[in-house]
Structure formats: C-alpha cells, structure tokens
Amino acid sequence: MNIRKGDTVELTIEKMAYGGRALAYHNSMAIFVDKTVPGDKITARVTRVKKNFAEARLLEVLEVSPHRAIAPCPYNDYCGGCNWQFIDYEKQLEYKHAFVEDSLHHIGKVADVPIHPILPCPQIFGYRNKMEFSFSDRRWLLPADKDCKEDDRHFALGLHVPGVFDKIIDLEGCLLQKERGNEILREVKEYVKGSELPVYGLKSHQGFWRYLVLRHSHYFDEWMVNLVTSEERGAALQPLIPILRDRFSEIASLVNNINTRRGGTAVGEWERTLAGRRNIRDKIGELTFEISAHSFFQTNTAMAEKLYQRVEDFASLTGKETVFDLYCGIGTVSLFLASLASKIIGMDISDSATGDAKRNCQLNGVDNCEFLCGDVKVLLSQLSIHPDLLITDPPRAGMHKKVIDQINQLLPDRIIYISCNPSTLARDVALLKERYRVEEVQPLDLFPNTHHVESVARLERSS
C-alpha cells in the first residue's frame, strides 16, 4: 500500500538518523519523524513523500520509549536551538557515536577503523560560551501567547523556529548559556522595547535592532555584549551602557556592530567599542586567548581543552616538525602545539581571526607560529614548505575539493582532521584514502542536547 501525503500512520521508531530526526519503516518505506526516540510507538501524519523516503509529523506517542527524558526547557517543542533535550543523555552519546561510525562506513567506505568511546560533556546545560539572539517584528506565538497584546506580536528577541526564517520565539532565557546571560538578555529586551526605535523585520528589511550576541569567558567569568544594529546611532545605545554596567559588573566588553546589508548575519561591516575592552579573554589549559566579537572560539570551553589534548596525543610531535594548521581561527590549535613543534603555519580567510591569532601569540610568549590570511586553497598552492603534520579544522561543509587536491600533492606524513560534521569528514576521508589510511577516530560531545558531534581523526600516509 502506497503512502500518500496527509495519511496518518502508526509507527515504531527504530533508530536515529544524522540531522537529529528519528527513523521508522512502514511497508518498507523509510519515514523520518522529528521529536521521537527509538522505542517510541507513535501515530504521525505524512507531510512529504519522495521516491525512497517520506517525512511525517508526530501526532501522539502511544507507547513511550524508555530512552525518553523530560525536557526542562519550556521552548523545547518549538525552538531549533537544542532539539534533543527529550532524549536520555547516555543515549544521546550512543547515537552520536553511531553517526560517526555509520558515516565513515557508508560515505567514506572505511572499515575496521578504531572509533574510541565518545568523550561525554560533564555539563549538559549552561555550557555554551556564545549565544546569538535575533530581533524580529514578527513573533512566533506559542500556545501561551495566543492572548498577547497586539504590540507584543510585533516584537521578539530570541531564537528561530526551524524552517521559519522570519519569525522568532521571544525568549526569557536559554538553558544552554549561564543564567547571568539570561539576565543580560532580559535587561536588553526591556530597554529595546522601551526605546523609540523599531526592531528589524526579516521580511521588510526595515528597523534598527538586529541581533544580541553574548560571549562568556569560562575561566575569567567575563561577558561581552555585542549589539548588532542596521545603522550607527550611538545616541540610541548610550543610555543602555550604564544600565548594563551598573547591574552586571562582569561585562568587560560592550560593542556595537553595524550591518547595513540585507543578509541575515550578525557580522557587522564595522564595529564600535561602547564601553570596556574590544575583546574578552579566556583560557584553555595554560594558554590565554583574546576573543573579539567575530572570533571563532570553540563554544564549549571545557570540552575544547579535551579536544585539543586529543589532537596533541594524535600529533605525536617530537619538537622537530613543521606543522600546517588549516582554518586556524584565532590560533587555538597552533598555540596549543607550539611548544612541541619547530614551526607552525596557520591559515584562515578571516583577517580578524588571524589578527587575533598573532596577538594571542604575543600574549602567550609564542614565537614559532606564523599566521597567513587568505583562502586556504590559494595559500597552500603558494607555499613551498613541506609540512610533516597537517591539521585541518574546516567548517561544517568540510574541505574544498581543491584543498584536498593540494594536500594530496603536499603529502604530509600525518593529517589530524577535526570535524564538526561526520558526513563531510567521511566524504573528505574518501577523497584522501588513496594516499592516506585512517588509523583512529575520537568522537567528543561538545554540544549536549543537540544532534551535533565533534570528532578528531588521525590519518597516516600509506607507505
């Protein structure tokens, strides 16, 4: 019997698929369903039918899986921030390990690779050191909001609903950040609602207030408040400065980024420091890092140290090696390994990131690291130096094919691949496997209560 859009079906959930959705089968047809756990028996309505699979929306849980947990967040059923709060944490770890294993096997065509047990995060809430909240003139109405005032329907500061680009859930707080961050969020919201300037419309592209980005220093307990606006109007921000600084002594940096473009990004075209420093500082191990508004810094500081420690273990440096650090960001990996190598060359397309990396070298007394700003695939083609070790930490999309071609020409003895996406890790490993073999992989949980998983792979050149 064929499945059609709109059908109501009874399903038993069998496994989790990468992307966070669960998988069931009906008459041999794979059906993906959100907000369910293996072991659930459910009814669902089919929302989409393709040739080889279908998608459905949960209607009712008939029998509850033993792996379900009670989500403590009141926004969990609607928000796209952390979609796995309702799954027992031990099972989250199990599913994430399976994502890495399945991707390497099915996409990378790599078999018999030791994949170590996933390293868990000791704190599954309050672990994020950066949160980005959006303003919107269109509020997503929760069931409790149906009677809210008309003015409130045109104001929101919070997070997106999955699949809806122009509406925002108005939040009182997020469990992924420290409670102090939620207090700052509420204070900014109160000020903005009382201001005469409108919030930004993601459809109309009109309005002043665009984003609130909060960064927290795990080690020093400092906060950065970054207000992203559509134009520079210092007078509109000036009254907020004493309000925040008087109430929150931990705010070390208050900046304004101005983004006049239509694109939905919290990166400003230019920046003004409103109060305090232009950056905050944090520590990983014995190293201190300066973090500016647009710096890439691992969002889970405590787990970042475990991540870089595993990179160090996999690198097995003797002090004589030349190391390339691709997509180096603010130089965290480079500095972590600097005392163990002869020379490290970091590369990143972001000018602000490589500038931060150079300052971080000075801050920590490191003199054997060099940082180059530019497109990694171009920089690799221009260098005549041969690396003994190559470390790559690409974005979620993985490495560009031309970068992989350059690596296959450089032929470093060893590659350490840091990945936040097992699918693109597996794809890139497949493109390298004529010359490299994967020796071991270490998954780590940097993002509890989400489906995301970090992993570190050690590749050795084939003899």
Image (cartoon, rainbow, N blue to C red):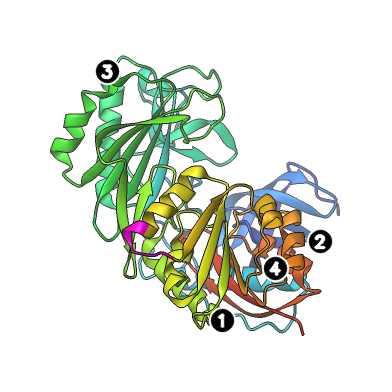
Q: Is residue 56 above or below residue 103?
A: above
Circle 2: element type: loop
User: Marks 4 and 3: CB-CB under 8 Å?
Assistant: no
Mark 4 or mark 3, earlier in chain: 4
Amino acid at circle 4? Ser
The kind of residue tagged 1 is: His
Q: What element carries label 4?
A: helix
The magenta stretch is 362-367
Residue located farthest toward the left when viewing the structure as drawn: 246
Alpha carbon separation for disc pair 4 and 3: 52 Å
Residue placed under numbered mark 4 in the picture:
103
Q: Which of marks 3 and 1 is in front?
A: 3
Instruction: Tell me the chief SS of the magenta region.
Output: loop
Residue 78 percent location from the top left of the image: 49, 43
Can you tell which of label 2 and label 4 is closer to the viewer?
A: 4
Q: Where is residue 180 in the image (x, y as percent from the top left)?
A: 24, 48
In the picture, the disc for residue 235 is: 3
Of residues 196 and 326, which is closer to you in this image?
326
Q: Earlier in the sequence, mark 2 or mark 4?
A: 2
Q: Is residue 24 left or right of residue 268?
A: right
Q: Classify mark 4: residues with Cα within 10 Å, few (<14), some (14-19) or many (20+).
A: many
How far is mark 2 from mark 4, CA to CA? 26 Å
- Checking the image for residue 27, the label placed there is 2
